[in-house]
Amino acid sequence: MSIVNLQEISDNLESSNSKDRLLALASLRQVDAEDAVPLIKKVLDDEVLPVRSMAVFALGVKKTEECYPILVKLLESDPDYGIRADAAGALGYLNDIRAFDALVRAFYEDTQWLVRFSAAVSLGNLGDIRAKQVLLAALRSGETVLQQAAISALGEIKAEDCVGDILDFAQSEDWLIRQRLAESLGNFNTEKSISALKYLAKDAHQQVAQAANYSLQKLGINS
């Protein structure tokens, strides 16, 4: 991208019109990370929440050495729980294993479910088996959205010894839980998981059945 265009984006990020700032952030998709991050930083403290939120997300996509410490600080200390959740999500996109401890702390210590949900999802993204105990805690939380995140993430970290725990949700009344289960089981080529997928492939909800059939195909099994 030319210097002229980068200057134009920089100017738009300083516009008094929040729409200009949002469009400028969106246009950074085409910009290399090294050029984009200094521009993103200009609006990290923006007065308009959607601008801040988009900037935080962008730091997870545009990976430079600066991004990790900024996101961890936001996760640990920003007063707005939406921004803390955005930071947790961005750390998952960043896929930096150093974020593991910060995400675990956020899950256990933050009082807002949205932050805890984002932390659980991102622990799955990191793919680290050490997250197993945290995710089992999410599974047993009684909060549907945390259970959804945990079921998906336990599949992503390939915690095979937890298949029995997630199978407890095979008859959940919430079809989204059953769909997440069908997707997650595609990570486990075991007798139990295949049997459960064949059961879910006959689910009355089309999206659950489709997810189960896809997972069976992924495992090379005929439903």
Image (cartoon, rainbow, N blue to C red):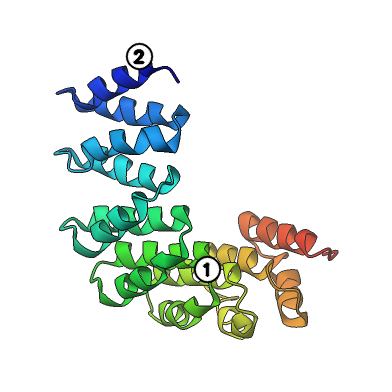
Residue 180: quarter of image = bottom right
Placement of 62 over or under 81, stated as above or below: above
User: In terms of image quadrants, where is residue 20?
Assistant: top left
97 with respect to 71 (left or right):
right
Q: Quadrant of the C terminus?
A: bottom right
- Indicate the position of residue 175 as horizontal and vertical percent values: 54, 63
Q: Is residue 57 above or below residue 209?
A: above
Distance, label 1 to label 2, CA atoms, is: 43 Å
Task: Name the kind of residue labelled 1 in the image.
Answer: Ala
- Tell whether 19 sits left or right of 219: left
Name the spot of residue 48 as percent of width and height, x first.
Answer: 17, 38
Q: Secondary structure at mark 2?
A: helix
145 on left or right of 151 = left
Nearer to me, 86 or 190: 86
**Disc 2 marks which residue?**
4
The residue pinned by badge 1 equals 153
Say whether disc 1 or disc 2 marks the residue closer to the N-terminus: 2
Q: Element at badge 1?
A: helix
Q: Amino acid at mark 2?
A: Val
Q: Is residue 221 among the parts visible in the rendering?
A: yes
Tell us which disc is closer to us: 1 or 2: 2
User: Depth check: 187 or 88 in front?
Assistant: 88
Give the class, few, some or many, for how many residues have Cα within 10 Å of label 2's Cα (few <14, many ≥20): few
The disc at residue 110 is: none
Please name the residue shown 17% across and 43% down the image.
45
83 up-or-down from 97: above or below: above
In the picture, which quadrant includes the N terminus? top left
Q: Residue furthest top?
A: 4
How many numbered dots are placed on residues in this image? 2
Near mark 1 (Cα within 10 A), the count class, few <14, some 14-19 or many ≥20, is many
**Looking at the picture, how far across and down is residue 152, in whole percent?**
54, 66
Q: Residue at x 36, y 45 (%)?
A: 59
